[in-house]
C-alpha cells in the first residue's frame, strides 16, 4: 500500500511518496554495509561515502533535479526548472550521508533522503515558491576518518577559521586528495560559503538518537536547542619499552596515563556533573603490541552540554587534570586539535510551524533538546533553523541496531513537507508568519579559554 501525503493548496498539490522514500533508505543502507555485523561504515570521503554520494546524485537526476558539488564537497540539489542563483532566498533542507564506523542506516541519511523527497514533491507539484527549495547533503559531518566534523556545514557558514589549512586523516593522509575525488576543491573552499540572508530558513529532519519520544509515545519531536560539543584530540607521549624487562617503577607508560584520562573524563561528567556527558571514543596506542609498553597514545575526549559556560568549566577542569596526570606519570599530554560547536536555539517561528504541521496530521509531538550535534548548528550562523525528530527504537544510534518504524519515517517526511509549505506561505490559513526576513537564532558566545599544552 502506497503511503502518500497529498496537500492541496490553491489548486496545487505536493506529494510525499512514502514507498519511494523507504526504498531509497533501504538502497542507501546497503552502501558500506558489513554483512557480518549488520553495521554501516561510510566515513566521510571514504570509498563507501563516495558511492553513497553518487547514488544520491543519480536519484536526484532521475527525479528531474539538478545536483551539484561545491568546493567543500557538499551536494546541493535544486529544481532543474529554476536558474542557479536566480536571486531568491533559499529554503534549505538536509543532513549528511557519512557515518561513524559500524553505524546504523538512518543517522543523517534519513534527513537527506527526506529533503530530496520534499524538493521532488515541489517539482512534481509545480509549486511556485517565493523561496527556492534546496536539499543538501553536508560533507563529513561525523569526522570519523578525517577528524574535522561538520566540515561541509562549517564551510557553508563561512567558518573557515575553525578549519585546518591542510587537514589530514588519522593516518596522516591529506583531505585535499579525497576532497578532489568527491568533486570538491580545498583551494577554493571559500567559495562554498553562503552569505547571511541567502537562506530564508533551514530545516533538518533526523532520528532522535535517544529514548524520549519512544518512552512518551510522541511521534514527532520539536527541537528547541542543540547541545554544544567540544572534541579534544590528545597526544599522550611516554617511553616505549619491553613489557617484561622494564620495572614498574620509572616507567613512562602512555597507555597507563591514557587510562587515567578516560577516568578523568568520566569523573567530571559523572561524579562532579560539570557537563552533561563526557566520552573517550577513540584510543590509538603505539606501537600497539602485547609485549611493549605504549610509547604514545592518541585519543579523543568529547564534552557536551547545552550551556556554554558549563562546557567551558568542564574543559578547563579537564585540562588541569591532564596536567596532574602528566606530572604523576612522567608523560607529556598535548592537546593537538580541538573542534567546537556552541549550543544553539532553534527558531520560534519554525518550531511553531513544525508543531502546527504535526497537529494537522494528528501526530502527537513534544518539545525537547537534542543531545547530539547536527549541521544545523553551523547553518544557524547564516539562517533561522528548525529541527524535527522521529522516535528511535530502543533510543539507540551509531550502532547497527539503530532503527525507526517505517510509519514514523514517513510521518517525519510528511511533517517536513508541511513545514516547508507553511514556511513559504502555502498550506494553512492560520500558519505562523514565515521567516521572510531571515534572522540568526540566539546563540551563546563562547568565553575566552586560554589554550595551552599540558605536560610535565
Image: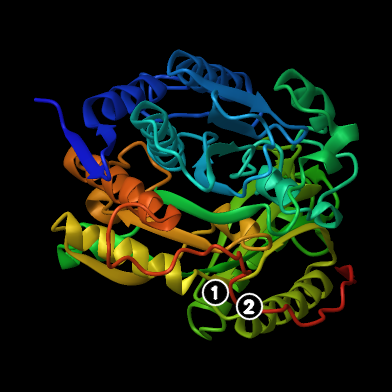
Residue drawn at x 51%, y 64% as measured from the top left: 435
Depth order, front residue of 192/144: 192
Instruction: Identify the residue position indicated by label 1 in the image.
Output: 305
Depth order, front residue of 455/409: 409
Residues marked 2 and 1 touching at CB (< 8 Å): yes
Query: How many C-alpha atoms fall within 10 Å of the one at disc 1: few (<14), some, or many (≥20)?
Result: many
Give the SS element for disc 2.
helix
* 235 horizontally vs 137: left or right: right
Depth order, front residue of 236/277: 277
Query: How many C-alpha atoms fall within 10 Å of the one at disc 2: few (<14), some, or many (≥20)?
Result: many
Mark drawn on residue 314: none
| Colour mode of the rendering | rainbow
Residue drawn at x 35%, y 52% as measured from the top left: 426
Q: Is residue 436 above or below residue 235?
A: below
Instruction: Identify the residue position indicated by label 2 in the image.
Output: 311
Query: In the image, residue 409 lies at what x, y percent?
Result: 26, 41
Residue drawn at x 71%, y 79% as measured from the top left: 445
Q: Is residue 211 visible?
A: no
Q: Quadrant of residue 137?
A: top right
Quadrant that contains the N terminus: top left
Q: Is residue 187 visible?
A: yes
Query: In the image, residue 424 lies at what x, y percent?
Result: 44, 53
* 368 horizontally vs 82: left or right: left
Q: Is residue 81 above or below residue 455?
A: above
Lower position in the chain sequence, tag 2 or tag 1:
1
Amino acid at each position: 500500500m502506497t503511503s502518500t501525503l497529498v496537500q492541496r493548496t490553491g489548486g496545487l498539490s505536493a506529494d510525499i511518496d512514502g514507498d519511494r522514500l523507504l526504498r531509497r533508505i533501504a538502497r542507501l543502507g546497503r552502501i558500506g554495509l558489513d554483512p557480518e555485523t549488520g553495521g554501516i561504515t561510510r566515513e566521510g570521503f571514504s570509498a563507501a561515502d563516495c558511492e553513497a554520494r553518487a547514488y544520491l546524485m543519480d536519484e536526484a537526476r532521475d527525479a528531474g533535479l539538478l545536483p551539484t558539488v561545491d568546493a567543500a564537497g557538499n551536494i546541493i540539489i535544486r529544481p532543474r526548472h529554476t536558474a542557479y542563483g536566480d536571486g531568491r532566498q533559499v529554503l534549505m533542507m538536509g543532513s549528511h550521508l557519512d557515518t561513524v564506523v559500524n553505524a546504523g542506516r538512518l543517522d543523517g541519511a534519513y534527513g537527506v533522503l527526506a529533503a530530496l523527497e520534499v524538493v521532488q514533491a515541489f517539482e512534481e507539484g509545480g509549486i511556485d515558491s517565493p523561496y527556492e527549495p534546496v536539499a543538501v547533503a553536508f560533507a563529513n559531518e561525523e569526522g570519523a576518518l578525517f577528524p574535522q566534523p561538520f566540515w561541509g556545514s562549517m564551510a557553508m557558514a563561512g567558518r573557515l577559521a575553525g578549519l585546518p589549512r591542510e587537514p589530514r586523516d588519522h593516518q596522516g593522509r591529506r583531505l585535499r586528495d579525497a576532497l578532489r575525488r568527491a568533486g570538491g576543491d580545498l583551494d577554493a573552499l571559500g567559495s562554498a560559503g553562503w552569505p547571511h540572508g541567502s537562506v530564508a530558513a533551514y530545516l533538518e529532519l533526523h532520528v532522535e538518537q535517544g529514548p524520549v519520544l519512544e518512552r512518551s509515545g510522541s511521534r514527532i519531536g520539536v527541537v528547541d536547542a542543540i547541545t554544544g560539543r567540544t572534541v579534544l584530540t590528545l597526544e599522550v607521549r611516554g617511553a616505549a619499552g619491553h613489557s617484561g624487562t622494564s620495572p614498574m617503577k620509572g616507567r613512562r607508560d602512555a597507555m597507563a596515563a591514557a587510562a587515567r584520562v578516560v577516568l578523568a573524563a568520566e569523573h567530571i561528567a559523572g561524579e562532579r556533573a560539570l557537563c552533561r556527558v563526557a566520552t573517550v571514543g577513540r584510543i590509538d596506542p603505539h606501537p600497539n603490541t602485547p609485549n611493549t609498553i605504549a610509547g604514545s597514545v592518541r585519543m579523543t575526549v568529547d564534552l557536551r552540554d547545552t550551556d556554554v559556560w558549563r562546557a567551558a568549566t568542564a574543559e578547563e577542569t579537564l585540562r588541569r587534570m591532564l596536567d596532574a596526570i602528566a606530572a604523576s606519570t612522567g608523560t607529556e599530554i598535548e592537546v593537538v586539535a580541538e573542534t567546537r560547536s556552541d549550543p544553539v536555539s532553534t527558531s520560534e517561528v519554525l518550531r511553531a510551524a513544525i508543531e502546527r504541521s504535526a497537529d494537522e496530521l494528528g501526530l502527537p509531538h513534544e518539545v525537547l533538546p537534542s543531545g547530539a550535534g547536527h549541521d544545523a548548528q553551523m547553518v544557524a550562523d547564516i539562517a533561522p533553523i528548525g529541527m524535527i525528530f522521529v522516535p528511535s527504537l530502543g533510543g539507540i544510534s551509531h550502532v547497527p541496531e539503530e532503527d525507526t518504524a517505517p510509519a514514523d519515517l514517513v510521518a517525519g517526511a510528511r511533517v517536513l513537507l508541511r513545514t516547508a509549505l507553511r514556511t513559504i506561505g502555502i498550506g494553512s490559513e492560520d500558519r505562523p508568519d514565515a521567516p521572510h526576513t531571515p534572522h540568526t537564532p540566539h546563540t551563546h558566545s563562547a568565553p575566552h579559554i586560554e589554550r595551552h599544552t599540558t605536560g610535565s
